Amino acid sequence: MVELADSAAAKRPELRDMPDAEALPLVRELAYQEQLSLIRSTLNAFGVHFDEWFSESTLHSGGHISDAIATLREQGHVEDRDGAIWLRTTDFGDDKDRVLIKADGEPTYFAADAAYYLSKRSRGFEEKIYLLGADHHGYVGRLKAIAACAGDDPKKNIEILIGQLMSVKGAKLSKRAKNIIALDDLIQWLGTDALRYTLARYPADSPIDVDPDLLQSRTNDNPVFYVQYAHARACNAARNAEAHGVDRQTFDAALLTHQTEEELLAHLGQFPQWSPQPPSCGSPTASRDTSKGSLRPTTAGTPHAAWPRPPTRTERPIPSATSTAAYSGSTMPPCRCSTMG
C-alpha cells in the first residue's frame, strides 16, 4: 500500500505540499485506482472478465446503508436498544442478533453486508451468490438471515459458497509462512490454461493441490496437456474435412456404424445439449435421466440420422502442438461474472 501511495504521489506532485487532512483522501483514492488497475490487468491475463465492479465505499457514500435499514425496519426485524440499531437475525436461526449501527453512530461491516444484499436485489438479481474464504463459515447463517429479514427465501434467493485454500505440492500457502504466490507469478510459471483447468475441474469448496511438475509435463498424465492436445487434434480433423469438401451442415449421422463411433455417440448423449435419448446402437448405452441427473442404461432411442448434431460455434485459433504443450496463450473461453471490491 505504501508503494501505491508513493506512485499516486508521483502522479500528483502537489499532494506533497498539501496538509495531511486534505492529501490523505486523495492519496487513498489514487492508490485504490492503482490497485484496481493491477487487479484488472491480472484478471485480463487470466481470461476472466467482470461485467460490473462495485466499490464498497459507494454503500457508505450513496445512502445505501440508511436505505437498507429503512427497508429492514419496514419488514419488522429492526429494533433500537442500548443506543444502537440491531437486526434480529435470531428470528431466522442466527446464533445472535447483529448490530447495524453502533452506539457512536458508526455503521458496522454487517450493515454494509445488508446494504449490498439489498442493492443486488434492487438491481434485479433474484439469486445472490456469495463466494467466501475458508475462514468465513460463520458468515453463512448471518447472510441467510439478512435474506430472510428482507422478506426473501434464504433457500432460493441466496447461495453461499465457501472456497478452500490452494497448496503447491502439499505446501500450504499463507501470509504467516511468507510463501504466498501471486496469481501473476503463477500465470507466468504454469500458464493460464493450466491454472484455469485446475481450478475448474474441482468444486469451489474442495481444497486444491497444484503439482507444478505435472502441469508442466508434456504427457497424457497431465490432464491439461491431454485436453489441449485432443482439442488441437479435433480442430485439425475439422480443417482436413473442410479441405476435402465435407460440410457439417449436411452431415449424416446414420453413416456412423463402427463400434467406436457408436461408443462416441453414446458418450456425447450424456451431455445436456444433446438429445437425452441416444441412438439405437445394438448394444446397451447410457443416457441421462434428466429428472434426477443420473445415468441409466438403455437400448432404445432415435435413429442416428434423426439425432441432433451439436450446436455450431465460431472456431478459435488453435496454437500448434509445440505452443500448446508450452501453454503459450490461452485456448480456454473467458469467464464472465461480477464482484464487489
Image (cartoon, helix red, strand yellow):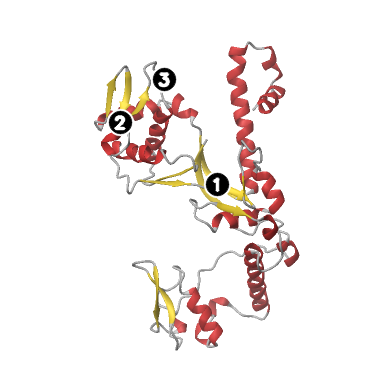
Image coordinates of residue 128 in percent, x first then y, are 40, 44
Residue 189 lies left or right of residue 312; in this view the side is right
Tell me where residue 237 sits by quadrant.
bottom right
Image coordinates of residue 211 in percent, x first then y, are 65, 56
Distance of label 2 from label 1 (alpha carbons): 36 Å
Residue in front for this viewpoint, 95 or 129? 95
Any mark on residue 126, and which? none
SS at mark 3?
loop
Tell me where residue 183 sits by quadrant.
top right
Distance of label 1 from label 3 (alpha carbons): 33 Å
Location of mark 1 (residue): 165
Q: Is residue 334 visible?
A: no
Is the residue under label 2 in contact with that under label 3 (CB below 8 Å)?
no
Does 88 sit above or below residue 225? above
SS at mark 1?
loop
Location of mark 3 (residue): 106
Image coordinates of residue 314 in percent, x first then y, are 59, 64
Amino acid type for the residue under numbered disc 1: Leu
Among numbered discs 3 and 2, the one appearing first in the sequence: 2
Location of mark 2 (residue): 71
Q: Residues within 10 Å of mark 1 (few under 14, many from 20)?
A: some
Residue 123 lies left or right of residue 48; in this view the side is left
